[in-house]
Image: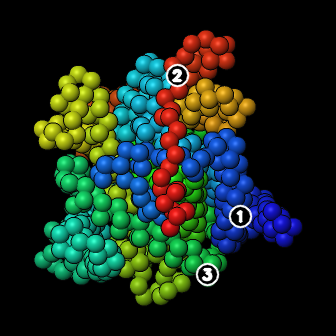
């Protein structure tokens, strides 16, 4: 590195430190959103340039001359050497679900500071490391899944626990994705019609690229993007059409059944017909929208209106119960550390990777990009007036069903808002009301629309709002599609131990059976969230965050065990430190959700409180009708949380046992790394 390069990076470090310091130390005065962008860019640039390069060279020792499974096992179907940018696009589209959008939005109830700091530090030290190391270890093991690597490296006990725990965690993750979509579309014909239109558009693009005009990728891309934008505009026309409007104006439960049905058909249809084109289109939509949002923020330099810390750090927040620690780290999973990424990094991505040198860009770089999405979401949520933010995200069960009740309650917290202000905002966004639109997606869409409107034209606010809803839905449905299919594969692997025919992914009865089981499982938890009078977020999002972080801890346990068995004990802190932190926060959050006497935090406490009210006749009729189911569901959530934390510690102790035996020279399962084979692709590239 030359003296000028050193000086340049020193300046980046200094500017980044100043930006982070300005965000962290600012009190009582408004702060410009541009500082958030500057801090994120500097932190990510430094981490990628130095930390990821050190991990690649010293810890993992990437070997670009080594043949990858995509080359050695190339079968033209699952294992295919693919251009690194296409692999990057696939990987980012698969990992970038709603988490980096919704988590920061919900966590803004604590203020902008805690979530922002966690996103920056958690990503570069935890999330990016997990994605990169799991992608590397899976690539070195013929693209094996996380559960299979756990069985091979830790043994049958830890391996079986990882397999069962991962499958059950996957069910919870998908259910929350569905809940976010339902809450965004509830009684919004514009949003519902726009999201519905994305399904035939994806099918049309799939048919276009496969049958109508094979190989014409650019044509299909332009067609798909044009139709997506037309769907947004068409949704506005449907919303104002008295005949068509009722066809897309539905209650949450009706929408939930539609999402469940969609998930089943998406899992059994050929991958090229729906999943692949949606994945492809969503990559363009995601990257383009985030880039446009960043440009708008740079141009506008909006002020952050949410305080650095709010009064709700004590756990009294209206959106979800729980104190700042540990719940800010649980609420923001994707964008900082996400266990779901480990399933992708040990799933499709290693089967497409043409060269090990691309692991750093795809694994570490892909997570950096998702973390930047989370920063954009935090900005979009916190540029709103705090009163407006809480009016949108607070459930009617907390602030009251009537608008007058809600604004009085929210204003009493010190965040003034008026009925007229909310009515005018809803009119601007093309909605009948924005009160109690829980789930995070609507408030994020309002924030994005406000930024886009101020930058590119206020007259288009309703278009921008529903474009943002579609943007979020594309994020979510892409992950819901992929998650359901991955869950089906995992269940088929498990059932294949008992019946080889059920383990065959090509046997259609098995496809139908396992898809039905997976969809029924996450559909049940989606149903729980939809019938909950509090909006479902208070019940399901903490369970989502806890289970997702536990999955990341499982992945880091496997990675730490492999590092120790590979003779790299001195580098095991790279995965061991984030593992220890995740174990602490997930165990703490689990303890709170199980043992807390606060009815807004503890599952058992909430169930007992509801049972007492039901017995005394204190519940209104509509709540009393669903109370028995909600009580059962709260108990189920508590026992699931206990099961997940038990699985986590079983795997951690099993990993420590294997490491201790290895360091003592005792026999352990041999490393399952595939033998080295020189890459012919490198020779071809050099010759070309």
Mark 2 is surrounded, within 10 Å at the Cα level, by few (under 14), some (14 to 19) or many (20 or more) other residues, namely few
Q: Position of residue 667 (x, y in %)?
A: 57, 13
Residue at left 34%, top 77%? 218
Residue at left 44%, top 18%? 157
**Along the horizontal axis of the image, is 427 left or right of 545?**
left
- Give the number of marks: 3
Q: Position of residue 460 (x, y in %)?
A: 41, 85
Q: Which quadrant of the structure image shows residue 526?
A: top left
Label 1 vs label 3, nearer the camera: 1
* Disc number for residue 42: 1
User: Mark 2 = which residue?
Assistant: 670
**Along the horizontal axis of the image, is 118 left or right of 8?**
left
Q: Which numbered disc flags the more N-terminal residue, 3 or 2?
A: 3
* Disc number for residue 300: 3
Q: CA distance from mark 1 to mark 3?
A: 20 Å
Q: CA distance from mark 2 to mark 1?
A: 41 Å
Furthest toward the right, the residue is: 3
Q: Is residue 32 above or below residue 372?
A: below
Q: Position of residue 133 (x, y in %)?
A: 57, 42
Q: Which numbered disc flags the more N-terminal residue, 2 or 1?
A: 1
Q: Secondary structure at mark 3?
A: helix
Residue at left 59%, top 76%? 297
Which quarter of the rendering shows the N terminus?
A: bottom right
Q: Which numbered disc flags the more N-terminal residue, 1 or 3?
A: 1
Q: Secondary structure at mark 2?
A: loop
Q: Is residue 354 above or below residue 285?
A: above
């Amino acid at each position: 590195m030359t003296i000028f390069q050193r000086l340049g990076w020193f300046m980046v470090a200094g500017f980044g430190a100043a930006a982070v310091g300005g965000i962290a130390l600012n009190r009582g005065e408004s702060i410009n959103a541009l500082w958030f962008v500057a801090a994120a860019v500097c932190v990510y640039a430094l981490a990628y340039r130095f930390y990821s390069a050190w991990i690649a060279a010293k810890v993992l020792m990437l070997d670009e001359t080594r043949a990858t499974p995509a080359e050695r096992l190339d079968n033209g179907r699952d294992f295919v050497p693919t251009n690194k940018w296409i692999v990057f696009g696939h990987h980012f589209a698969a990992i970038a679900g709603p988490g980096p959008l919704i988590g920061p939005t919900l966590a803004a109830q604590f203020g902008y500071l805690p979530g922002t700091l966690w996103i920056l530090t958690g990503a570069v030290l935890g999330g990016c490391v997990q994605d990169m190391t799991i992608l590397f270890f899976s690539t070195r093991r013929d693209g094996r899944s996380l559960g299979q690597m756990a069985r091979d490296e830790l043994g049958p006990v830890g391996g079986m626990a990882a397999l069962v725990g991962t499958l059950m965690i996957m069910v919870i993750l998908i259910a929350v994705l569905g809940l976010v979509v339902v809450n965004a579309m509830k009684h919004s014909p514009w949003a519902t019609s726009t999201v519905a239109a994305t399904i035939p558009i994806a099918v049309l693009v799939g048919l276009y690229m496969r049958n109508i005009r094979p190989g014409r990728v650019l044509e299909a891309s332009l067609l798909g993007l044009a139709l997506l934008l037309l769907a947004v505009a068409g949704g506005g026309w449907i919303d104002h059409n008295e005949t068509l409007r009722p066809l897309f104006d539905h209650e949450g439960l009706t929408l939930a059944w539609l999402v469940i049905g969609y998930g089943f058909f998406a899992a059994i249809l050929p991958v090229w017909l729906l999943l692949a084109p949606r994945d492809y289109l969503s990559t363009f939509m995601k990257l383009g929208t985030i880039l446009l949002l960043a440009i708008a923020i740079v141009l506008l330099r909006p002020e952050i209106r949410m305080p650095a810390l709010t009064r709700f750090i004590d756990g009294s927040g209206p959106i979800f119960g729980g104190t700042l620690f540990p719940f800010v780290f649980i609420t923001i999973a994707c964008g900082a550390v996400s266990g779901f990424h480990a399933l992708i990094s040990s799933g499709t991505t290693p089967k497409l990777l043409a060269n090990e040198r691309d692991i750093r860009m795809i694994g570490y770089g892909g997570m950096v990009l998702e973390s930047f999405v989370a920063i954009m979401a935090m900005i979009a949520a916190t540029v709103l007036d705090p009163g407006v933010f809480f009016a949108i995200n607070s459930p009617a069960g907390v602030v009251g069903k009537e608008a007058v009740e809600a604004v009085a309650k929210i204003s009493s917290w010190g965040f003034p808002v008026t009925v007229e202000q909310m009515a005018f905002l809803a009119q601007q966004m093309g909605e009948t009301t924005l009160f109690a639109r829980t789930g995070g997606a609507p408030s994020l869409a309002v924030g994005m629309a406000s930024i886009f409107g101020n930058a590119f034209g206020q007259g288009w606010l309703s278009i921008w709002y529903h474009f943002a809803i579609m943007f979020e839905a594309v994020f979510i449905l892409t992950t819901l599609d992929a998650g359901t299919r991955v869950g089906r594969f995992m269940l088929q692997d498990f059932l294949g131990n008992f019946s080889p025919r059920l383990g065959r992914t090509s046997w259609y009865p098995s496809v139908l059976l396992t898809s039905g089981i997976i969809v029924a499982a996450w559909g049940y938890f989606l149903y729980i969230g939809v019938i909950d009078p509090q909006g479902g977020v208070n019940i399901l999002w903490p369970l989502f965050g806890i289970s997702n972080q536990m999955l990341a801890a499982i992945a880091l346990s496997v990675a730490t065990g492999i590092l120790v068995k590979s003779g790299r004990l001195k580098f095991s802190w790279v995965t061991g430190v984030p593992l220890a932190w995740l174990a602490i926060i997930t165990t703490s959050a689990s303890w709170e959700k199980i043992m807390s006497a606060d009815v807004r935090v503890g599952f058992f406490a909430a169930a007992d409180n509801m049972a007492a009210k039901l017995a005394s006749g204190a519940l209104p009729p509509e709540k009393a009708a669903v109370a028995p189911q909600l009580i059962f569901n709260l108990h189920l959530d508590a026992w699931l949380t206990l099961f997940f934390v038990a699985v986590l510690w079983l795997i951690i102790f099993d990993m420590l046992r294997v490491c201790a035996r290895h360091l003592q020279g005792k026999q352990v399962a041999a490393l399952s790394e595939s033998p080295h084979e020189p890459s012919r692709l490198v020779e071809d590239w050099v010759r070309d």
